[in-house]
Amino acid sequence: MTTEGSPGQGQGLHTHVLDTLGLAITAGEYLPGSVLRTDEIAERFDASRTVVREVVRVLESMHLVESRRRVGVTVRPTDEWNVYDPRVIRWRLAGTDRPRQLRSLTVLRSAIEPVAAGLAARLATPQQCAELTEAALGMVRTSRGHQLEGYLQHDIAFHRVVLNASGNEMFARLGDVVAEVLTGRTEHAVMFHDPDPAAVTLHVQVAEAVREGDAERAEALTRRIAVGALEELDVLAP
């Protein structure tokens, strides 16, 4: 019988242990320098040593912990964490530091996405333009009647296309980061029940500007979306 309400041995238990420890570390329950004993983790979750080792390896890859011989698994300082890892973002958004984390990520988006949209207007393929238009229209269709889950999927698709169509591989890799931010806002109710109609319209206009090759307009409109997102945070996550 497993503890902590966890599933049995296997991938399900691996995910459960990883999420539980990741949430605890990013929430500050284990301060930097704290030592986690693998034998205690195994006992706590009724997990095999193999499962615990795999979990530790994943946490090490995120720079949340480091293994020290004869010491154990030590929590690393927060400034060493891989804060761009989507799972780290997800865990931090689930914690008490959510407002600051949301604002930090939204400021990042406001610096990157307008530039990406301008590049997309110059470089997007016809297929990418069609995908962007489809995502924007999907946002329109699901922007009323409390269809936030459906809206979220179209919103994520829209921003992924913009980043990919920029032609910059560094921007494109931020697609998962943006997806976690948008998902976190929805899951933790840091959104209005129905999206702001003005923001939805701006997305449609960005798709039009990209399709028409108007880089200056695409960048300016996307910057207005970013400003609006920050203003929403002032109200919903002050």
Image (cartoon, helix red, strand yellow):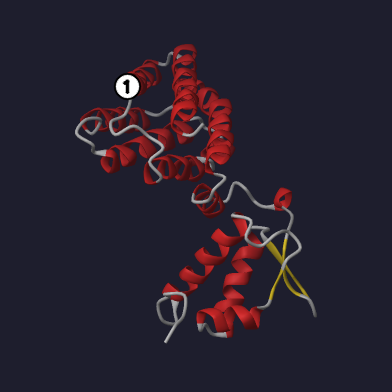
Q: Is residue 98 left or right of residue 25?
A: left
Against 203, residue 1 (above or below) is below
Residue drawn at x 47%, y 36% is 164
132, above or below 99, in the image: above
Helix, strand or loop at label 1? It is helix
* Front one among 110 and 92: 92
Residue at image mark 1: 204
Which residue type carries mark 1? Val
Task: Residue 27 in the image: state x and y as whole percent.
Answer: 59, 55
Q: Position of residue 183 (x, y in %)?
A: 41, 44
**Point 62% across, 48% down: residue:** 83
Return the x and y of residue 81 as percentages of the image width and height: 67, 52
The residue sitting at the right extreme is 70
Depth check: 158 or 124 in front? 158
Residue sitting at the far bottom: 1
Q: Is residue 50 visible?
A: no
Q: Which residue occupies the foreground of this view, 154 or 197?
A: 197
Residue 24 appears in the figure: yes
Which residue corresponds to the image point at 58% horizontal and 74% vertical from the top-left?
Answer: 54
Q: Position of residue 235 (x, y in %)?
A: 45, 27
Whether 77 is drawn above or below 171: the answer is below
